[in-house]
Amino acid sequence: MSTGGTGRVAVISGGTTGIGLATARRFLRDGYRVGVFGHSAESVRQAGASLAESVEAGRAVASQVDLRKPEAIQSFFNDIGARFGAPSVLVCCAGVSPKGNNGPSLVGTIPRGEWDDVLSINLTGAMLCCQYVLPDMQNNRFGRIIFVGSLAGRTRPLIAGPAYAVSKAALAGLSRSLVTQYGRFGITANVVAPGRILSGMTGPASSDVNRQAITRIPAGRLGTTDEVSAAIAFLASDEAGFVNGAILDVNGGEFTPS
């Protein structure tokens, strides 16, 4: 597959860990210049170390950004524009999925603060990132926007809480709105919906939750972050120019919509 990434600029929210970091590595291999950001200083430090060769070569930057603060998002995109130029690819991978000692919150008792925080980061943050890249994408008549959704936003959530499930399901609506309003400018917007993926968020494969999840997956295993990043790389490529408003499930067959 020819990704066509050489010289292009990609931004990845939530790009300092897990799927986002795997996508950053994939994009760098494909010739992109890449800006990633994460919420915690430690994740940014670790991502910077992981991408050290590309950072030192001036092809990557890792920053700390709070998606609940629009001014922080704007500052990051201003910095990326000054360093690399306008992004032509945006991957919205940031996501939080809070759980207590007894598992996810119930709809009937979820604290308002938890609900607001999850939607602010997972959904509103994605929309704000779109607002910062759309003008240049429209002017350049090319853009690729990929939202990282979730199996929890595709079918009945068994592990995730209600705020997470709602926020990830809503990304499909945001994608379709972008298709309607910006598709004529050469901009595509799609969703990659991972199932249970082996990452820091899901914990070790040997955990009880993951062992139970594997019994529901026809592939008989958890997915990898590289498998998800490969799907993202395809949707970012020139070859995916006629794929718009789609949801690409990467779940080992656990959910197969008709």
Image (tube, grey):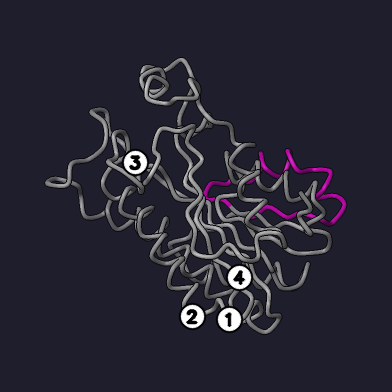
Left or right: 22 in relation to 31: left
Magenta range is 38-63
Distance between mark 1 and mark 3 Cα atoms: 38 Å
Distance between mark 4 and mark 3 Cα atoms: 27 Å
Identify which residue is drawn at 85% across, 49% down.
Answer: 56
Left or right: 15 in relation to 58: left
- Residue position for label 1: 184
- Residue position for label 4: 75
Question: Label 4 sits on what residue type?
Answer: Ser
User: Dots 1 and 3: beta carbons under 8 Å?
Assistant: no
Left or right: 69 in relation to 228: left
Residue 238 vs residue 198, the one in the foreground: 238
Tag 3 secondary structure: loop
Residue 157 to residue 243: above or below: above
Tag 2 secondary structure: helix
Distance between mark 1 and mark 4 Cα atoms: 29 Å
Nearer the observer: mark 1 or 2; the answer is: 1
Distance between mark 4 and mark 2 Cα atoms: 26 Å
Question: Label 2 sits on what residue type?
Answer: Gln
Distance between mark 1 and mark 2 Cα atoms: 8 Å
Q: Earlier in the sequence, mark 4 or mark 2?
A: 4
Specify whether residue 251 is painted magenta. Answer: no
